[in-house]
Image (spheres, rainbow, N blue to C red):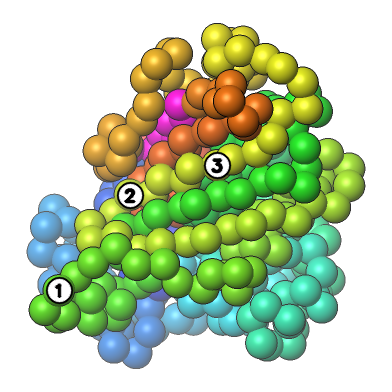
Amino acid sequence: MSKLKAAIVGITGYTGEELLKILLRHPGVEVSVVAGRSSSENKPVKELYPSIGETSLVCENLDIDSVAKRADVVFLALPHKVSFEIAPKFLEKGARVVDLSADFRLESAEVYEKWYGEKHTAPAHLKKAVYGLPELYRAKIKNASLVANPGCYPTTIILGLLPVLKEGLIDLSSVISDSKSGISGAGRKTVAEYYSSEHPNLRAYNIAGAHRHIPEIEQELSKIVGKDIAITFTPHIFPEERGMLSSIYSNLKKKISTAEAVQLYKEFYSREPFVEVLSEGKLPGIRDVVNTNYCRIGLKVDERTGRLVVISVIDNLLKGASGQAVQNMNIMFGIDEKTGL
C-alpha cells in the first residue's frame, strides 16, 4: 500500500518542527516536501534541526503548484493572517489542508476581524472548514477538505466541559477557566525573550476578556448547548517550555457527588483514544502529558459551594497543536487514529 504524501508549509516554528518529527516516524506517511519562509529556504532540514534524524529533505521556496502536485495533504504551520491567503489555493489544486493557525477556526469573518485586526480574505471557506476537535466532530473531519486545528487553550477547556455541557448539569453563566501554558505557546521569539530575562516567572496576561482564544472557546461551547455562553478566561505563562493546565470552575445546577461526576466523565470518554479521565481522588499534572497527544482530566465537586472543579492538562505542542493535527489527518484518510502518536 502506497504511503500518504504530506507537505508541511512553515517549519521554523515549534508546531512545524513537532509536525516534522511526528510525520517522519509515521509508518503511513511520506513527507514529500517542506517549505518555509525566506530565512529557511534551500537549507537542509537536518541543518535546521540536527536532532531530527536522517533525512534528505531540503526546505524549499513555497511554490503552490509544485507542492500541491506532490502532496495528498498539506499542513499549514504558519502565523495567523497568512493561512487564509494560502489555504484556498491548495484547495483549488485538490489538496486537503490541515491549518494550524486561527484563520479558519471562527465561523464569522466579522468576529475574526474584530479579534485579529485583519480583514479575512477567504470568508467563504469559514463555513466550509471543519473545527478539528475529534471528540466533537470526528464524522465531519473524516470528509473534510479543510480542517481548522483547534487552539491549545480551547482544547483543554472544551474537553474539560464537554460531558457536563452535554448533560446540562452546569449554570452556563458561571464558567471560569484559570489556564496556564508553557512559554512555547507564545512562539520561539517569546521563548528567547523569556529566558533572556534574569528572573523568569509565572504571570497572567491578556486578562478580562482580551485573549484571542475567547471567541473560539465561546463559539464551540455555545454550539454544544445551543445558546450563547460567555466565560471568564484568565491565561498565564509559566517558566517551562511546554505543557498546559486549565482549572475550570462552574456552578452545578443540581447536587451530584464527585463519584457521580467522575463516572459521567469516564463513560463519556470511554471510547476516546486520547482522553483519559482519572479516578476519584486523583488529579493530573503537566508532566503526565508532556510529549504525548493525551488530554488527562481530573475533577472534584466542592460540596461547600456546589461548584464543579475540573483540571484538564495537555502538551500544548501536541494535543494542543501538531499531535492533534496528525490525529485529524489520520481520521481524514481512514488511518487508525493513534498511528504515529
Query: Secondary structure beneath disc 2?
Result: loop
**Residue 29 horizontal side relative to residue 89, left or right:** left
**Residue 223 horizontal side relative to residue 22, left or right:** right
Answer whether residue 213 is magenta in the image. no
Query: Mark number for residue 248?
Result: 3
**Residue 256 horizontal side relative to residue 35, left or right:** right
Residue sitting nearer the eye, 58 or 202:
202
**169 up-or-down from 241: above or below:** above
Q: Disc 1, disc 2: CB below 8 Å?
A: no
Q: Residue at x 47, y 45 (%)?
A: 246
Residue closest to the far front: 304
Disc on the earlier residue, 1 or 3: 1
Task: Choose top left, top right, bottom left or bottom right for residue 35.
Answer: bottom left
> Is residue 20 in sight in this rendering?
no
Depth-wise, is mark 2 or mark 3 nearer the camera? 3
Q: Residue at x 71, y 29 (%)?
A: 252
- Give the residues drawn in magenta, as a range: 292-298
Q: Residue at x 61, y 17 (%)?
A: 261
Q: Quadrant of the N terminus?
A: top left
Q: Amino acid at mark 2?
A: Gly
Which residue lies under the disc numbered 2?
243
Query: Secondary structure beneath disc 1?
Result: loop
**Residue 127 horizontal side relative to residue 189, left or right:** right
Residue sitting nearer the eye, 167 or 232:
232
Residue sitting nearer the eye, 112 or 29:
112
Which residue lies under the disc numbered 1?
199
Q: Amino acid at mark 1?
A: His
Badge 1: few (under 14), some or many (20 or more) residues near its Cα, within 10 Å?
A: few
